Image (spheres, rainbow, N blue to C red):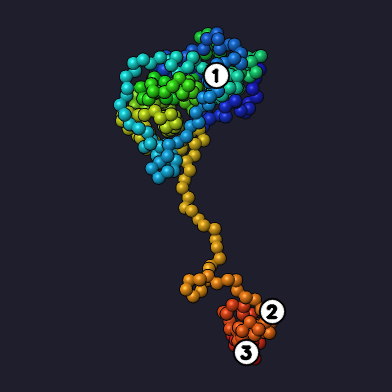
Amino acid sequence: MTERPPGRPGRLARAVLGPLVAAGLLGGCAVQATAADEVALTTAPSVAPDAPPVEPAPAPSPDGAAPATALAALEALEVKGRAPRTGYDRDLFGDGWVDTDRNGCDTRNDVLARDLTGETFKPGTRDCVVLTGSLADPYSGRTIGFQRGQGTSEAVQIDHVVALSDAWQKGAQQWDAGTRARFANDPLNLLAVDGPLNMQKSDGDAATWLPPRTAFRCTYVARQVAVKLSYGVWVTQAEKDAMARVLGSCPDEPLPGGVVAAQPQPATAPEQPPVVVGPMGVEPGPAPTYANCAEVKAAGAAPIRAGDPGFSPRFDGDGDGVGCES
């Protein structure tokens, strides 16, 4: 077995939300580890090359600027009633965990490698198949040991923060197969969490389920907002109200995933020297320069006074403000 040294980053940058769990939840069914998970995943299925992973992007606010906080972004979500669950099937979101980032490992192992600490890998899998590790569970606050195997893998599951069944009832029925597969495997929407809590959550939204660890609720709801904003998934009125209550206690909670709202800045023109406008609004040419009073007189500018174009104190021997008088 190979072990990642402490502090070595995983294949996916360790996300703001930290830990996550291995299991998919849709309609109350968590995806358990199986013997297939033990196989090196260099042949993990991937989405079609013409369907690149969706990059999360906040929806613009009315003034054109991206929302700066999760609370502000919440206002950009469409509010509609929940559609029937009719026709929902986990396989409509892809055949299990796939390799959307084309790194040779399926998403489940990518997420475990991202969120566990002290993880070890199955030899011969190029640090792909995670065998053991430790999870700081964001939902409960407990530390949970992960050990791959029958009867042990389910202690840590991968939760879809926005459940697939919930998304199905709020817009995903209209998506194509590639978009649904990317949604189901998007790291923004995945967290390694306590298995039993993941099962308890089932396909609940913020109106029906929140993590028991209250300190994590703002981060959790902010991530739901970011996911729904990225994919155009709507919310019910009850769900939006529940999200607003949570985010109202942390109005500065940012959207996760490194999404930073661009704040509009007033346009500032570069400093320009003052323009002196002559008679009839015509801008004069460059001020003349004279080497001595002979040039001043030759130019017909004598006597030259302080403030006149080309005046120099050296022309004013008596200091009365008038030069080249004689």
Q: Establish if 77 lies above or below 147.
A: below
| Residue sitting at x 34%, y 16% | 86
Measured as percent of width and height from the top left, residue 56 is found at 48, 32
Q: Earlier in the sequence, mark 2 or mark 3?
A: 2
Measured as percent of width and height from the top left, residue 88 is found at 38, 16
Count of numbered tags: 3
Can you identify the residue that label 1 sits on? 46
Cα separation, mark 2 vs mark 1, equals 80 Å
Judged left or right of residue 119, residue 165 is left
Pick the residue in front: 21 or 99.
99
Can you identify the residue that label 3 sits on? 325
Quadrant assignment, res 114: top right
Can you identify the residue that label 2 sits on? 291
Q: Earlier in the sequence, mark 1 or mark 3?
A: 1
Q: In the structure shown, which secondary structural element does the residue marked by tag 2 occupy?
A: loop
Cα separation, mark 1 vs mark 3, equals 91 Å
Amino acid on which disc 1 is placed: Ser
Amino acid on which disc 3 is placed: Glu
Which quadrant does the C terminus fall into? bottom right
Quadrant assignment, res 180: top left
